[in-house]
Amino acid sequence: MVHRRTQVAIIGAGPAGLLLGALLARHGIDAVIVEQRSAEYVLSRIRAGVLEQTTVDLLREAGVADRCLKEGLTHEGIELSFDGALHRIDFRALTDKHVTVYGQTEVTHDLMQSRASSNLMTDYEAESVEVSGFDCERPAVRYLKGGVSHELACDFIAGCDGYHGICRASVPTDAISTYEKVYPFGWLGVLADVPPVRHELIYANHDRGFALCSQRSRTRSRYYVQCSLDDQADQWSDEAFWDELRRRLPAEIAEAVTTGPSIEKSIAPLRSFVAEPMRFGRLFLAGDAAHIVPPTGAKGLNLAATDVGYLARGLAEHYLERSSSGLDHYSTRCLSRVWKAERFSWWFTSLMHRFPDAGAFGSRLQQAELAYLVGSRSASSALAENYVGLPL
Ligand SMILES: Cc1cc2nc3c(=O)[nH]c(=O)nc-3n(C[C@H](O)[C@H](O)[C@H](O)COP(=O)(O)OP(=O)(O)OC[C@H]3O[C@@H](n4cnc5c(N)ncnc54)[C@H](O)[C@@H]3O)c2cc1C
């Protein structure tokens, strides 16, 4: 058995765990990350791509924003497509803010590089991870690595292990409440090394279903179409995907789409989920371990970043100022932000997608609401404010 001790044991090396580790290192707080997958596997996951300014500020605070600031694309608006036409929501004019397009894979890469160059410890490929003692003074993490048992004693455990992780599942059921909505469709996504069709993202409401023209860089595009939950990604040829995408876009945009071979194709189900509270004694849940939003509002990665922003501040106050205030308020502060993002993501999803039971009336209501949205400055401002996000 290998015995070690650290101040904060972080479960999961996704964006939440890695960013928390980087922020804690800035405060001189020792942390070990325990991750069940290999580093290569973690880096191969294609996910989010839109960063709020608050997330970029946290990357800067963690000392890992250089490449994001240099290579990230500033987006000062999005376009909504409905009724065959495009309508721009101008973030700069409505909120004086913008978002940055920089892939989650790049964020993860930068955080991993920074961790490795500072010799901070991450134990990848940990099996049978268990957390215990968080309801008393002796929290610990146990796992197997290469057939050898490890025990990591710590002051606190940060559960950054995503929706399917073990931290939330280790909490007694009578201590936690969960709220969930599963949507009756998914997103079929394609990543391709082709230039994006427009400089900004296009969100399309169409009779055939939702479509999104997104991007990761000036040469790499990420496109999505709403699909059935019964669909399989490998049953969609590239050609069928591009045809379906173009059918859901206004004619001049459809003609301008550059197609090419997909380098990744997958289907993501859509879900809204919140677990309350986010603190259980010495265990703190952060990111997807505590909440999931449908990706329409681009909030998942940003919420993970702000959770660990609050947690890092609370832990710094605990160790450096001997104050428990930040940790005591962690759950309430996060959940206030989480529910705002849940409401926005649910609303934007409901507005843009075809629901099987909505009928013609539901579809006309969507058109009426979209027309109101783009015709009213206060309605456009509300969308823009929610999309660009709140300060920490
Ligand atoms: C297919 C897909 C597409 C998405 N697209 C978008 C998007 O377009 N925009 C957006 O904002 N968000 C999107 N999201 C959401 C966004 O990617 C997540 O919100 C973000 O990854 C959350 O980061 P996290 O660190 O909390 O969790 P994760 O990224 O899930 O990381 C959790 C980590 O914990 C590890 N882990 C799990 N269990 C254990 C265990 N028992 N022991 C040790 N380690 C464990 C996992 O291997 C993983 O590395 C998408 C998510 C998915 C799944």
Image: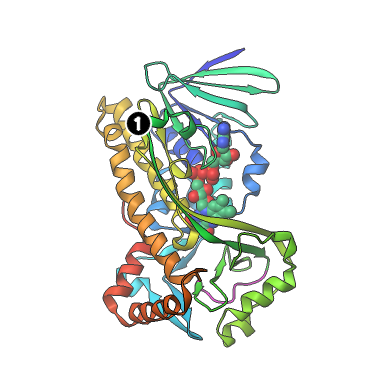
Q: Amino acid at mark 1?
A: Leu
Residue displayed at 50% across by 24% down = 131
In which quadrant of the rendered image does the N terminus lie?
top right
Magenta-colored span: 194-201
Q: Main secondary structure of the magenta part?
A: loop
Q: Is residue 197 magenta?
A: yes
Residue on which the image places disc 1: 315
Residue 47 can be seen, yes or no = no
Residue 379: % across, % down: 30, 74
Choose between 345 and 229: the one closer to the eye.
229
* Above or below for 195 versus 82: above
Choose between 52 and 211: the one closer to the eye.
211
Residue 356: % across, % down: 52, 69
Residue displayed at 40% across by 21% down = 155
* Above or below for 285 versus 301: above
The answer to whether residue 155 is left or right of residue 227 is left
Instruction: Tell me how the rendering is colored.
Output: rainbow
